[in-house]
Amino acid sequence: MSSPALSPPSSTPADAPVDSPPSPLKRSTLLALCACVLVAQSMVAAINLLIPQLAASSLHPSATELLWTVDAYVIVFAGLLIPVGALGDRRGRKGVLLAGLALFAAGAALSALAASPALLIAGRGVSGAGAACITPATMSILVQLAGPEHRARALASWTLAIGLGGLAGNAGGGAVGQFLSWRALFWLMVPLAVLLAWAVAVAVPRTDRSPHGRPDPRGTLLLVAALVALLAGIIEGPTYGWTSPRILVLFAVGAALTGLFTWYALRSPAALFDPRVFRSRRLRAAVLGTATGFFGLFSLFYANSQYLQYVKGYGPAVTGLAIVPLTIGMALFPKVATRWQAASGPRPAVATGLFLIGAGLLGASTADAATPYALYACWLLVISAGTGLCMPALTVGVVSALPAHQAGLGSGLGTSAREIGAALGVAVTGTVLAVHAADARAGSFADAMSPALRTVGAVVLVATVLVTVGYRTGSGGAAATR
């Protein structure tokens, strides 16, 4: 018997799909959707390993332009997730997914053809908009098609694809950085997106549109602007200083717009989403846990590539492959987590998984030039096991807090938490590295990486306590919606 946290909300509408055994079509649908989200997520990480090549390229980008080449994708991606998820619920999830793949390909082509940093940044932003369409649409379709008995397993596969996307980005970006031109990475994305669009057209059925809700352009504008201001402040904080006027203004604007959106949404008869869903402690805990897991994971991604190149002396291609141990736990433990959740509820898997991520980061913080790679890989396996245990339960926790007809909105909310957590992980790690004057010398970077990962690991462990308490006291039911 499924636990209450794994069951759909009691407010599931009558037109929701009826539970049925999985079919070959559903298996092909799952593979197509997971491939889409893996590719979209991979472009968050891939560009990082190409920064040295871009800096020396004929584009001659400034330091600020390099920063925006990396950040434009993330900011547009995270800023549009919630409104695009809601749009898919209303207008058709498969159509939004296909439109997202088209935008992703167009942005990649523009980046590959860019003759100036401005065009490269614009291309990255267009691809980020495509990724914002792809990610919530894929999860929403899975929620609609999987049925209550198979939803947890399907979302575990989707979560695995998210994690594998980060690893694929590291491996692919490293290989391109060592053997090809940076433009090759973007050119490869174009036929790949076309192939994925064909797979979606053939293997993914259309799902019922939500009969609830109307377009909310004012709420959408307020929420997107708030998220963009917040993310820009987080991402640029290490560069300009957390107390600089530029960063303080961005945070102030983000806070003001968030407050204005909340005020507007509470009074609107057709708001983008009802902020009162956050009355659910379980939802708050799931969102915090999701952000915490990706906070730790992307802190590791950021420090790992530099540690392996500066301290261990690996080339870009080997660096990309050296993080592959993270795939093992992500591939093996979701099945364990699904059975554990069915028997004991989500709380034990969430608490254990987040604890392992924090402990693994503390272990990795002891690495230096003399540390054998085999020992370093063991800490990666600990983090991997933690991610595989907690992320499926956290994903289900966010989605199940909303009615099934709002699955796209729930996906956008959960993925926004992932991206904000990832941005914070990179920002905090970058700040601590800068405080300790890390550079490309082996000893210097190793000395700085240790306090950086210790700081992130400690934050993850503290957040784990808060998430665990939230799961103990929270209600598993759906929040009230209009």
Image (tube, rainbow, N blue to C red):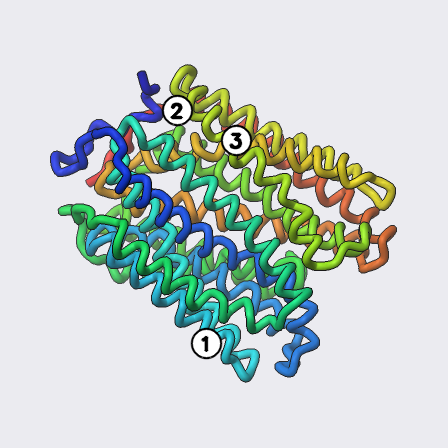
Quarter of the figure with the C terminus: top left
Percent position of residue 22, x then y = 27, 33
User: Left or right: 304 with respect to 469?
Assistant: right
Q: Residue at x 79, y 37 (%)?
A: 366
Quarter of the figure with the N terminus: top left
Judge depth for marks 3 and 1 and give the one in front.
3
Q: Residue at x 55, y 52 (%)?
A: 168
Percent position of residue 2, x then y = 32, 20
User: Left or right: 103 with respect to 95?
Assistant: right
Earlier sequence position, callout 3 versus callout 1: 1
Residue annotated with mark 1: 110
Q: Residue at x 31, y 30 (%)?
A: 150
Amino acid bearing label 1: Leu
Q: In this rendering, is residue 328 above or below 6? A: below
Earlier sequence position, callout 2 versus callout 3: 3
Q: Residues within 10 Å of mark 3 (few under 14, many from 20)?
A: some
Label 2 SS: loop
Residue annotated with mark 2: 474
Residue annotated with mark 3: 332
Q: Residues within 10 Å of mark 1 (few under 14, many from 20)?
A: many
Q: In this rendering, is residue 317 above or below 333? A: below
Q: Quadrant of residue 328?
A: top right
